[in-house]
Amino acid sequence: MEDHFLSNGRVLLFGHRGYSSLAPENTLAAFRILLEKQIPGAELDVHRCKSGELVVTHDDNLERVTGFKGRVAETDFSRIRSLDAGGWFSHEFKGEKIPLFDEVLELLGKNVYFDIELKRRGKAENGLEEEVLSRIRAHNIEKLSLLSSFNPWCIRRVNRLAPEIPTAVIYSASKKIPFFLRHGEARFITNARLLKPNYKVVRPWTILVQKKVFKAEVLPWIVNDPQIAEKLLKAGARGIISNDPGKIMSLEYYRSSAR
């Protein structure tokens, strides 16, 4: 797609789960602030809940952000909607809800580009990829979308269903990740265009190797320190994913590279 947002070579900047340093992550409040601050990209996480709706929240379990000890995949949307997803962050945001994917897309429109992380465990399909792609097409944001996942089977399925939409493999050194996927090895079974490593496992020389040897662009997360962000960008990182993207956007190096 020649006019896809990735095609012009500019440096990218995403607000991680919205503007999550100023509002509870993955809520409409966090995405509103993203718009107010004119951050160009939105990173968000999508699950399919028990009743089939696509909801925007990060963890498999709802406890951390709502206090409810239940898995997203085992909970109906009516129950999820009743939960407070903002009070944990501050009293100001008490009553914020976990939004539907559609609600986030309606709010953001075509004012940003998207990194949509698919949240599904294992190989078993649950319709997540098909539903996400359906909503992307309904909102006509194919050229503004990047789909990413820790799960290589999600990426493989997206590549089959929508080869025109770029994909990214996410990885880190966390022990929660299978040891054979902690260094981006999933690129060999997905043919993803981008690699999304935790910034702590990235070195300037690894960015160069990925670009020159594997022809893959590197998009590190979660970078909140402007000095670290500048170092990674100067080494050739395609962009930055940050909880506090306003700090990164203020960098002169970013501003000159994002034009």
Image (cartoon, rainbow, N blue to C red):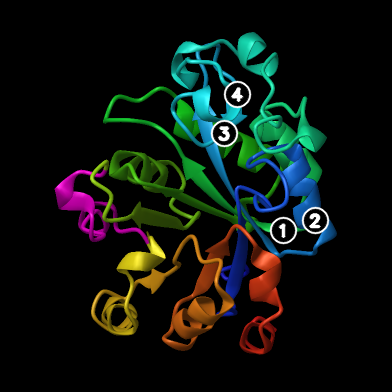
Q: Which numbered dot is residue 112?
A: 1
Sequence-first tag of 1 and 4: 4
Residue 237 image point, x, y percent? 45, 77
Q: Are marks 1 and 2 in contact (CB under 8 Å)?
A: yes
Left/right placement of residue 124 relative to residue 31 reads left
Sequence-first tag of 3 and 2: 2
Left/right placement of residue 44 relative to residue 40 reads left
Left/right placement of residue 62 relative to residue 200 reads right
Q: Is residue 4 visible?
A: no
Q: Residue at x 26, y 81 (%)?
A: 209
- The N terminus lies in which quarter of the figure? bottom right
The residues bearing labels 3 and 1 have C-alpha atoms spaced at a distance of: 19 Å
Q: Is residue 12 above or below residue 179?
A: below
Which SS class for mark 1? loop
Q: Which residues are magenta?
A: 177-192
Front of the two marks 1 and 4: 4
